Amino acid sequence: MNDMTRSAEPRAARLVAGKPDAGRSLGPHLPPPMASDPLPRRPLRAGPFGVLDVGSTKVTCLIGRVDGDGKLRVLGFGMRQSRGVRAGGITDLDGAEQAVRGAVGDAEIQADHRLRSVIVNLTCGAPESRLFGVQWPVGGRAVTEADVRRVVQEGRARAALEGRENIHALPLGFSVDATLGVADPRGLHCDVLSARLHVVDAAATALRNLETAVLRCELYISELVSAPLAAGLSALVEDERQLGATVIDMGGGTTGIGVFSEGNLLHTAQLAVGGSHVTNDLARVLSTSVADAERLKTVYGNAEGSPDDEREILSVPLVGEEEHHFTKIPRSQLVDVIRPRLEETFELVRERLDQAGLAREAGTRVVLTGGASQLAGAREMAGRVLDRQVRLGRPLALRGLADDVSGPGLATVAGLLNWAGGLGPLADIDTSDEPAGWISRVVIFIRNRL
């Protein structure tokens, strides 16, 4: 197995300086020089890189690279049943370490590559999403890259809360004086540079527990990426990201929400409810084991009833009874348990979207991803409760990944691979030369000693 090491990429895509002017200014009556290019996409990353989706029901690792034509290729894939993780947070370090080691080890064997760092999804620490408007005095001169960094850095500082760690600072747009909707302000003259920022943060203690679990596997976290952001990168088409769409990432222990518009992630939210709650409801009501409840949900479950449900009889093994001891129930009983839990989930989603006040930006399109979204009837119920057009989102095809393991349940980890390869269209600006967060400091500390 190769023991190649690679320095971790910075947690944020950095702005590059504008190209030099073709000639000197000919006077104050000419229009101000414009930057040659819009804010860049994230730089393509060379060589193999790894991503890790630490979920409540499964831990998934992908190792990939960017081919010469700019397309992603999966080199290794590993998946293990999750242990020691609940609602995205670490509850048992030993169990989490075992699951992560297994998933990463399987991917490393396939890829014939040893990972030293991984990009990990953010679901722990009760992530919160906030928008900030920030102004920075420029004094009539041309805006420089340093000015852009300072205005975003000011937004990060204003967003800082005790006990919370800023994960993303996504610029949604700039303004130069009274001119709105500027994508790249570098080179434009103005008195005041303004920026609208989307900041995502999470509880620092939960992040430390996640970091500890990964470090115990001889890995370090090079970046954390919001799970709804990652799911949107893999499951949304470009028109949906531009015109407005909402991603609902239905995992085992959590449900993530991401609102996209004009190519940007405008809002995220997370609910502490997921597919495992449906399974546990069935286990309690039917007095069966969690494993049998999961099987019944997967094979026979449906969120929408049908006339045949009363006539279809299912055999349910009872917990604690002798082997081959079953009870008989109509399929309609499964529906009666599943329906209220999913209705509650989508009603909570609707409430969060209403609170965000982004109805116009979110458009009328909803894309369901995550393993729990595959439950029969979930799409139809989401359309009825949310009163929007709903489709089931599968991650866009990745070279080297078999079709049978590329369903909606892998949308997040596929999006992480897009982000890791630099294919994501969203810029997350690193605003300082020194790492501000504790995760960045740990990364630098470990890297300097390897």
Image (spheres, grey):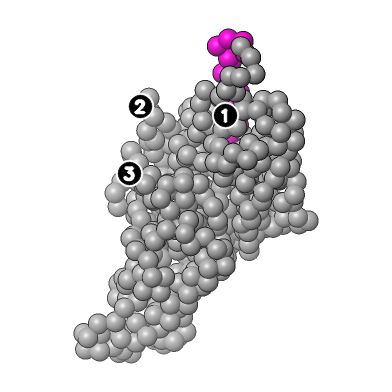
Q: Nearer the viewer, residue 232 or 360?
A: 360
- Residue 282 is labelled as none
Give the residue pinned by disc 3: 397
Q: Amino acid at mark 2?
A: Asp
Q: Residue at x 32, y 71 (%)?
A: 380
> Mainly helix, strand or loop, the magenta region?
loop
Give the residue pinned by disc 1: 6
Q: Amino acid at mark 3?
A: Ala
Are there few (<14), some (14-19), or many (20+) residues within 10 Å of tag 2? few
Q: Is residue 307 left or right of residue 142?
A: left
Q: Secondary structure at mark 1?
A: loop
Q: Is residue 407 left or right of residue 93?
A: left
- Residue 146's spot in the image, x, y percent? 70, 29
Give the residue pinned by disc 2: 69
- Residue 10's spot in the image, x, y percent? 62, 34
Q: Residue at x 35, y 56 (%)?
A: 393
Q: Amino acid at mark 1?
A: Arg
Rendered-image quadrant of the C terminus: top right
